[in-house]
Image (cartoon, rainbow, N blue to C red):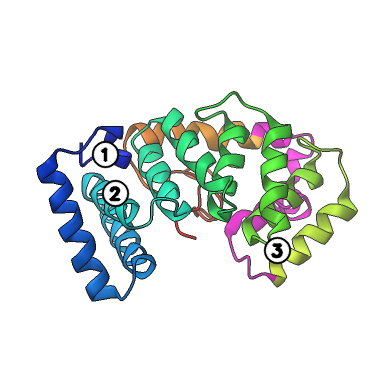
Amino acid sequence: KNELPMYGGLPFTSQEEEINKDFIREAVRIAGDKEKAAQRAIEAGWDSYFKKDYAQAIRRFNQAWLLDPENPGVFHGFGTVMGDLGQGDEFVKWNRKAAEARWGNAQVNMAWAYLIGYGVDQNAQEAARWYQIAADQDHPTGLNALGLLYDWGHGVAQDSAKAKVFYEKADQEGFAGNWKYFRKEVFLKENPDAENITFQEIINDLSEDYFRDVKKNKQHAVFSRVKDRSSTLIPWRRR
């Protein structure tokens, strides 16, 4: 159960309870307080995640949960790992919990889930709603993605002026991701023969690659057929 988020909701034995108390006591002694100790455990979880040691990542996120049970960064970590393991329902469950606690990267992940239909039915309007929530917190990826939706008229009414405002704010907030390539003016300049393409077609192409790579347990699983590949939008891993 140590390799399941929140230990699978299973009760602890009396021996496990004592082990947990000893762990918390020692972690707080080293870090100074529970919040700092939880952050250390979360960082250790991400280190394991990027080494593709998913079991160890969950163990570390579980330790962080013991220390700080309401920390949205923990839920975001759970969701990211489970998503990479191909469990769309769990990806949505944990990211939603973090997103509702105003965790920006989880909000972006929720938008992505609705954009491609991962763990939920595909819904461009709901994707736009989550990107708007992230953008309202000045999340650079949320701002850029919302700009894309307005630029292409996907899930929202097409509005080039609004798209420009969101692009500019995203750049001001430090957005440097290669999803700038999909800004309509840039995309059509690079692909003049794609004048009639829709954003839905672009998303369909990306999601095919995403689902294929998730099945192979690949991280940063997108953009295999897209110019300027990156994973800066889908999904965000760290805060």
Q: Position of residue 210 (x, y in %)?
A: 47, 37
In the rendered structure, does residue 171 fall within the stretch colored magenta?
A: no
**Separation of disc 3 and disc 2 at Cα?**
33 Å
Instruction: Please state the extent of the stretch shown in magenta in the rendering.
Output: 173-201
Mark 1 secondary-structure assignment: helix
Between 32 and 194, the one nearer to me in the picture: 32
The residue under label 2 is 62
Q: Quadrant of residue 63?
A: bottom left
Taking 32 as reference, is 51 above or below it?
A: above
Q: Nearer the viewer, mark 3 or mark 1?
A: 1
**Majority secondary structure in the magenta region:** helix
Disc number for residue 7: 1
* Residue 237 visible, this angle: no
Q: Quadrant of residue 103?
A: bottom right
Q: Nearer the viewer, mark 3 or mark 2?
A: 2
**Separation of disc 3 and disc 1 at Cα?**
38 Å
